[in-house]
Image (cartoon, rainbow, N blue to C red):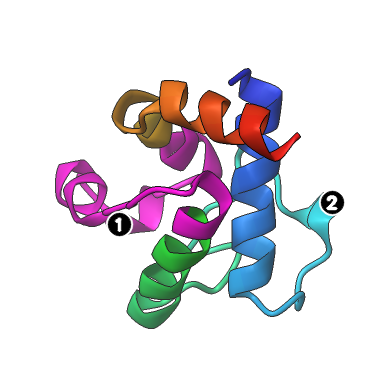
Amino acid sequence: MNKTNLLLKVKNAVKATLNNEVDEENITIDSKLIQDLNFDSLKVAILSVHLENEFNQAVILDNLLRDIDDPLDLTVAKLCEYLEKNLDFESIRENETVGA
């Protein structure tokens, strides 16, 4: 999966988590989830579910949150980097091929 598709899926999950309260163009790679998009712990949990739906596999954000020095610094970019390192993109590719 290329970085553009990854970012699009993350943006879709963020937008769904926020119940479309934020326009997609306001969700950028540099957006901070807590400071810019008003995420709280419940929204992070809901985001995890939306990410699981986008990628068709379990997405556990606990490790990401534990590894970040300050949760206020969690950006869309850091979330994408974490997913890139921790998701099985081969199975995503297979699922997309089967669904096509």
The secondary structure that dominates the magenta segment is helix
* In this rendering, position of residue 88 left or right of residue 29: left
Residue 25, labelled with which disc?
2
| Mark nearer the N terminus (2 vs 1) | 2
The count of marks equals 2
The part of the image, by quadrant, that contains residue 17 is bottom right
Quadrant of the snapshot with the N terminus: top right
Look at the picture and state if 11 lies above or below 8. Answer: below
Residue 71, labelled with which disc?
1
Residue appearing at x 60%, y 66% in the figure = 37
Look at the picture and state if 39 lies above or below 99. Answer: below
| Type of amino acid under label 2 | Glu
- Measured from the top left, where is residue 48 in percent x and y? 40, 62
Q: Is residue 42 magenta?
A: no
* In this rendering, position of residue 52 left or right of residue 54: left
Q: Nearer the viewer, residue 15 or 5?
A: 5
Q: Is residue 76 magenta?
A: yes
Determine the CA span between mark 2 and mark 1. Answer: 23 Å
The part of the image, by quadrant, that contains residue 100 is top right
Q: Nearer the viewer, residue 84 or 22?
A: 84
- Measured from the top left, where is residue 96 in percent x and y? 64, 33
Q: Which residues are magenta?
A: 52-80
Question: Are circles 2 and 1 on residues that touch, CB within 8 Å?
Answer: no
| Type of amino acid under label 1 | Pro
Residue appearing at x 62%, y 22% in the figure = 3
- Measured from the top left, where is residue 97 in percent x and y? 65, 27
- Measured from the top left, where is residue 40 in percent x and y? 40, 77
Residue appearing at x 49%, y 55% in the figure = 51
